[in-house]
Amino acid sequence: MSKNIAIHQLSDLPAAAAQLLQEHPLQRIFAFHGQMGAGKTTFIKTLCQMLGVEGPTASPTYSLVNEYQGRAGIRIFHFDFYRILTPLEALDMGFEEYLDSGHYCFIEWPEKIDGLLPADCLHLQITLQDEERILSFRTI
């Protein structure tokens, strides 16, 4: 299954995030693909807000993972694997336990951990077309 959502401006993000969460209510593992500056972190921040995170969110570029608390006990793990050199680094930090936790896992730069994601992971591609961002999501 593949679907596209056009994001024309920042004010479109909450509706796009709500649509994604509504269409995939049981999904917990999301892999975000896209070039540097495509908007992966910004979209993840919006998803976190939709899930009830009230505090600040930021990309865990150096720490590799940030944890956020949403409403009603929702836990969210936000990964940024841009700086890792091998998938072994993700395994060393206990990545598989996060995946098995049943909590939300939002993963930036999933291509760096090729082979570690479960088959039911939802892959999201953010591409830039002129001034518009296109969010495509699919399961593989």
Image (cartoon, rainbow, N blue to C red):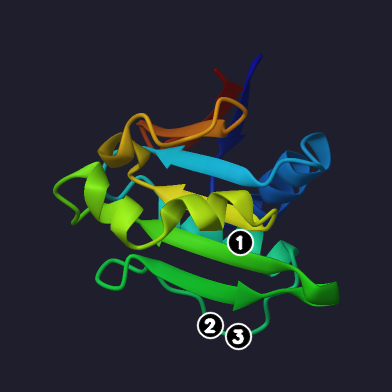
Counting from the top left corner in percent of width and height, residue 134 is at: 50, 31
Callout 3 secondary element: loop
Closer to the camera: disc 1 or disc 3? 3
Q: How far is mark 1 from mark 2, CA to CA?
A: 11 Å
Viewport quadrant of the N terminus:
top right
Label 3–label 2 contact, CB within 8 A:
yes
Q: How far is mark 1 from mark 3, CA to CA?
A: 12 Å
Counting from the top left corner in percent of width and height, residue 68 is at: 59, 75
The residue drawn where x is 80% and y is 42% is 26
Task: Identify residue type, mark 3.
Answer: Gly
Counting from the top left corner in percent of width and height, residue 70 is at: 72, 74
Residue highlighted by disc 3: 55
Left or right of 98: which side holds 41? Answer: left
* Mark 3 crowd level (few <14, some 14–19, many ≥20, 10 Å Cα): few
| N-term-proximal mark, 1 vs 2 | 1
Left or right of 39: which side holds 2? Answer: right
**Residue 62, image quadrant:** bottom left
Could one spot residue 61 in this view of the protein? yes
Q: How far is mark 3 from mark 2, CA to CA?
A: 4 Å
- In this view, the residue in front, 127 or 78, is 78
Callout 2 secondary element: loop
Residue highlighted by disc 1: 46
Q: Which mark is residue 56?
A: 2
Task: Identify residue type, mark 2.
Answer: Pro
The residue drawn where x is 60% and y is 85% is 55
Task: Identify residue type, mark 1.
Answer: Thr
* Mark 1 crowd level (few <14, some 14–19, many ≥20, 10 Å Cα): many
